[in-house]
Amino acid sequence: MVKFIHRFEEAILCLLLTGLTVLVFFETLLRFQGKGTLWMEETVQWTVAWFVLFGASYGVRVGAHIGLTVLTDKIAHPTIKRIIALIAVGVCIAYTIIFLYSSWQYVYTQYRIGFGMNDLPVKQWIPYTGLLIGFALLLIRFSVITWQLLTGKINSLNYADEAKESVEQHAQPMPKTEENIL
């Protein structure tokens, strides 16, 4: 099931990115000709919103989010690291549940009211379902991390360490070129 969610999420992200690229390209061409369209602009806005929501879940999965690790890097004991990680994931789960519940209320309200989009022949609640899907995926991701922490498969959260990556990148010797020698 988890593998299916991984593939589903990656496929949706690829489709959204491809769609964004195509829409922005054609919108740019049309604007150069003085013929921009409102429906493309609105579609791009919603596609970006969906991309951000799916991207947040994907970022949790691959550890691309920046972690605040000033204290946890100093802790050597794996059990204490795991407890701190469980607390952090618990906060993330609570946050996600609050947003998921609020999103459900909002989408349901939009559904009941029945307003349409400004420039698209679509009801407003349809694009807003991206909130539900995005936060549901985040909840699944954080639940998987919680399970891995509880079963001892991991001892801390996976995060992006930009400072470490930057130091490693600059520690590599630069290739010698005429510009570097001068």
Image (cartoon, rainbow, N blue to C red):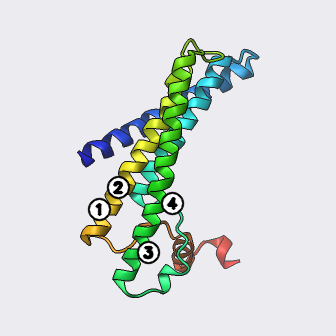
Compared with 92, 20 (above or below) is above
Report, in whole angstroms, how far the alpha carbon at label 3 lies from the one at label 4.
17 Å
Quick one: SS at disc 1? helix
From the viewer's perspective, tell me whether residue 147 is left or right of residue 10: left
Question: In the image, residue 35 lies at what x, y percent?
Answer: 72, 15
Query: Circles 3 and 4: CB distance less than 8 Å?
Result: no
Report, in whole angstroms, how far the alpha carbon at label 1 lies from the one at label 4.
19 Å
Task: Give the residue at x 58% y 24%.
Answer: 43
Question: In the image, residue 33 lies at what x, y percent?
Answer: 73, 17
Q: Quadrant of the C terminus?
A: bottom right
Mark earlier in primary sequence (3, 2): 3
Task: Give the residue at x 47% y 66%.
Answer: 88
Residue at label 3? 84
Task: Give the residue at x 37% y 41%.
Answer: 9
Q: In which quarter of the image is the N terminus?
A: top left
Report, in whole angstroms, how far the alpha carbon at label 2 lies from the one at label 4.
17 Å
Determine which of the numbered discs, if any, sits on residue 143 in the image.
2
Residue at label 4? 65
